[in-house]
Image: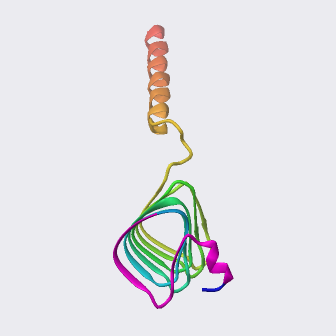
Amino acid sequence: MNDSDSDYEFYVGTATHLEGASLAIDGTARIDGKIVGKVAVKHLIVGPGGVVQGDISGETAKVEGTVEDSLTLTGKLTVCSSGRIRGKIQYGSLETMEGAKLVGEISTDWGSSSSEPLVSDRLEAFTSAVNSDDAEVSDDD
């Protein structure tokens, strides 16, 4: 490991393959090898040759390698030009570089802090507008 590797709470080197893992990391994890399992991490970095398969959750992630299965983030997802993500992807905000690949079910929280969808508010406004128009039409009859 070089000096920059000491900035990570968890590191998987290029020659490492870790399978069946269930990890909870309060900090930054960098994956340059392969990890298969469940990973909960504050900030995830998947290096250019890195592969992460399984249920991944956290705040932020920077993907230069491959992520498969599910990725759930509350904050920013950055996908570099060499990054590949396949599966169920949820994020707070998204940054992608030209060449990045995302395949699967992709969603965001849309910045809404309320638990009710915005569609219901629009539907109520539309319904009340239609009802008031109907009332005006029937008054004219």
Q: What residue is drawn where x is 49% and y is 33%?
A: 122
Residue toward you, 108 or 75 = 75
Q: What residue span does the magenta drawing correspond to? A: 3-24
Residue 95 percent across, percent down from the top left: 61, 65
Residue 56 percent across, percent down from the top left: 42, 65
Image height check: is 6 above or below 113?
below
Say left or right for 85 vs 36.
right
The quadrant of the image that shows the N terminus is bottom right
Residue 41 percent across, percent down from the top left: 49, 63
Q: What residue is drawn where x is 52% and y is 54%?
A: 74
Image height check: is 56 above or below 75?
below
Q: Is residue 7 magenta?
A: yes
Q: What residue is drawn where x is 44% and y is 20%?
A: 131
Residue toward you, 56 or 127 = 56
Residue lying farthest to the bottom in this orientation: 15
Q: Is residue 26 magenta?
A: no
Residue lying farthest to the left in this orientation: 20
The quadrant of the image that shows the C terminus is top left
Q: What residue is drawn where x is 47% and y is 84%?
A: 33
Say left or right for 54 vs 47.
left
Image height check: is 120 above or below 16?
above
Residue 26 percent across, percent down from the top left: 52, 60
* Quarter occupied by residue 96: bottom right
Residue toward you, 44 or 72 = 44
Display colour scheme: rainbow
Residue lying farthest to the right in this orientation: 3
